[in-house]
Image (tube, grey):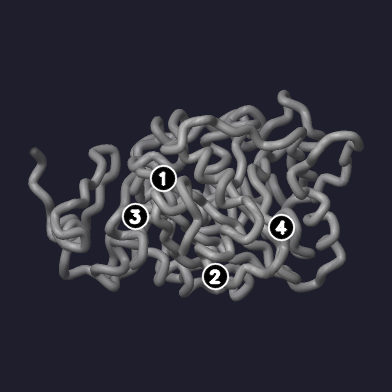
C-alpha cells in the first residue's frame, strides 16, 4: 500500500479512517509551500463517468483546500483529445472541461496548470462562439419495482409534499423527475452531442419563484462524486436558463406527451435574476461531503448555493411519517 503524504493524511483524518483516496488521483505538495497539487488521470477523464472517485476532482480539491487552507492547482498526467479542434462526440472530456472551467472561475483558490488553462480557454471560446441546446424529456420518468432501489426512492420523493417534508422550504411547486442534461451543437441530434449521456438527467427538481431547486439523490451510495454531480447540474441549469448563460434554452416542445415539468423552465426565460439551489440528498454521506458543501458556498456566484439534506430510507420507501 502506498504511504500517505501529509496532505493525504489530513484528508483521511476528516473521515476517521473511512476515506480512501483513489489511486488515479495524486494529491501532493511541499508542506512549507502555499499550494497543493491535484493531478488527474487524463485517460480516465475521457473514458469514465465524472462522478467516479478518480474523476470527481471537485470533492478532492475542496477537501485539500479545507484541511490545508492552501490554494490548489489542478493538473492532468497526459493529453486531452483536442488536437483536431473537434468537441462533438467527446462527451466525457467536454463535461470535464466545462466543470474545470466553472470551478476555476468560481473559486479564487483554484488554479489550473498551464496546459489545462490553455485547453479550458479554447473550450470557453468554443462555447462562447456557438449555439448549444439542451434535450427535452419525452414521456414520464420510469419506475422500478425494488423498494431498496434509488429509482423507487426518487419516485416516492416526487409525490406531493413528501420532498418538502424531508428537505424543508423548497416552495409549494410540484416536484419533477429526470430533467435531461445533454448538450448539442446547433441542433438536438445524436451526432451533435457535446456532453456525454443522452439519457443523463437530474434526479429531482422544482421551481420556487425565481429559484430552481436541483436535487441529486443517493441511496446506499455514500460517494464523493455527489459533489461533482450537484456542481455540474447546478451550473448547467444556470447556463441554460439564466439571461447571461452560455446555452440556449430549447423551446421545441412537442405536444401530446409529458415533458417532466419542462414547461416550468420555459416560464422562467423572461426572469432577470435566476437562482439555483443545489441540494445533495442521501441516506448516507461520504465523510467529506458536508465540509465540501461549506466551501462550495464560498463561491463568487451568489446566484448558486448548495446544501446537504438527509432522509431515512425505511421511512421514505415504507411509510411517510416524519
Mark 3 vs mark 2, foreground winner is: 2
Q: Is residue 98 left or right of residue 40?
A: right
Q: Position of residue 89 (x, y in %)?
A: 63, 27
Q: Quadrant of residue 77?
A: top left
Q: Among all residues in the image, which is located at the extreme right?
A: 255
Q: CA distance from mark 3 to mark 4?
A: 26 Å
Note whether 248 is above or below 91 in the view shown.
below
Mark 2 falls on what kind of element? loop
What residue is pinned by disc 2?
168
Mark 4 falls on what kind of element? loop
Mark 1 falls on what kind of element? loop
Mark 4 or mark 1, which is nearer the start of the sequence? Answer: 4
The reply to whether callout 3 and callout 4 are in contact (CB within 8 Å) is no
Q: Is residue 289 left or right of residue 99?
A: left
Mark 4 or mark 3, which is nearer the start of the sequence? Answer: 4
Q: CA distance from mark 1 to mark 3?
A: 9 Å
Give the numbered dot on residue 285. 3
Mark 3 or mark 1, which is nearer the start of the sequence? Answer: 1
The reply to whether callout 1 and callout 3 are in contact (CB within 8 Å) is no
Q: Position of residue 239 (x, y in %)?
A: 69, 56
Mark 2 or mark 3, which is nearer the start of the sequence? Answer: 2
What residue is pinned by disc 4?
174
Mark 3 vs mark 4, foreground winner is: 4
Q: CA distance from mark 1 to mark 4?
A: 22 Å
Mark 2 or mark 4, which is nearer the start of the sequence? Answer: 2
Please report the residue visible at 52 percent of the width from the left and 51 percent of the height from the top: 216
Query: Dot 3 surroundings within 10 Å: few (below 14), some, or many (20 or more)?
Result: many
Query: Dot 2 surroundings within 10 Å: few (below 14), some, or many (20 or more)?
Result: few
Amino acid at each position: 500500500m502506498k504511504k500517505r503524504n501529509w496532505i493525504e493524511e489530513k484528508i483521511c483524518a476528516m473521515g476517521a479512517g473511512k476515506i480512501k483516496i483513489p489511486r488515479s488521483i495524486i494529491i501532493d505538495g511541499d508542506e512549507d509551500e502555499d499550494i497543493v497539487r491535484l493531478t488527474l488521470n487524463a485517460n480516465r477523464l475521457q473514458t469514465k463517468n465524472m462522478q467516479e472517485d478518480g474523476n470527481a476532482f471537485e470533492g478532492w480539491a475542496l477537501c485539500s483546500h479545507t484541511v490545508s487552507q492552501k490554494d490548489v492547482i489542478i493538473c492532468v498526467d497526459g493529453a486531452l483529445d483536442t488536437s483536431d479542434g473537434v468537441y462533438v462526440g467527446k462527451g466525457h472530456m467536454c463535461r470535464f472541461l466545462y466543470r474545470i472551467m466553472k470551478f476555476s472561475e468560481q473559486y479564487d483558490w483554484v488554479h489550473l496548470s498551464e496546459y489545462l488553462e490553455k485547453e479550458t480557454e479554447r473550450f470557453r471560446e468554443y462555447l462562447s462562439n456557438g449555439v448549444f441546446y439542451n434535450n427535452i424529456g419525452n414521456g414520464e420518468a420510469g419506475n422500478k419495482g425494488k423498494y431498496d432501489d434509488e429509482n423507487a426512492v426518487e419516485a416516492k420523493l416526487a409525490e406531493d409534499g413528501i420532498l418538502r417534508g424531508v428537505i424543508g422550504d423548497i416552495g409549494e411547486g410540484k416536484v419533477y423527475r429526470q430533467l435531461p442534461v445533454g448538450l448539442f451543437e446547433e441542433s438536438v441530434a445524436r451526432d451533435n452531442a457535446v456532453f456525454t449521456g443522452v439519457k443523463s438527467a437530474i434526479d429531482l427538481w422544482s421551481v420556487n419563484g425565481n429559484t430552481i431547486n436541483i436535487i441529486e439523490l443517493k441511496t446506499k451510495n455514500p460517494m464523493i462524486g455527489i459533489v461533482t454531480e450537484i456542481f455540474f447540474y447546478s451550473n448547467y441549469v444556470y447556463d441554460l436558463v439564466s439571461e447571461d448563460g452560455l446555452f440556449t434554452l430549447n423551446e421545441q416542445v412537442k405536444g401530446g406527451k409529458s415533458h417532466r415539468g419542462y414547461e416550468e423552465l420555459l416560464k422562467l426565460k423572461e426572469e432577470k435574476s435566476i437562482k439555483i439551489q443545489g441540494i445533495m440528498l442521501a441516506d448516507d454521506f461520504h465523510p467529506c461531503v458536508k465540509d465540501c458543501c461549506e466551501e462550495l458556498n464560498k463561491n463568487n456566484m451568489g446566484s448558486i448555493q448548495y446544501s446537504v439534506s438527509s432522509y431515512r430510507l425505511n421511512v421514505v420507501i415504507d411509510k411517510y411519517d416524519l
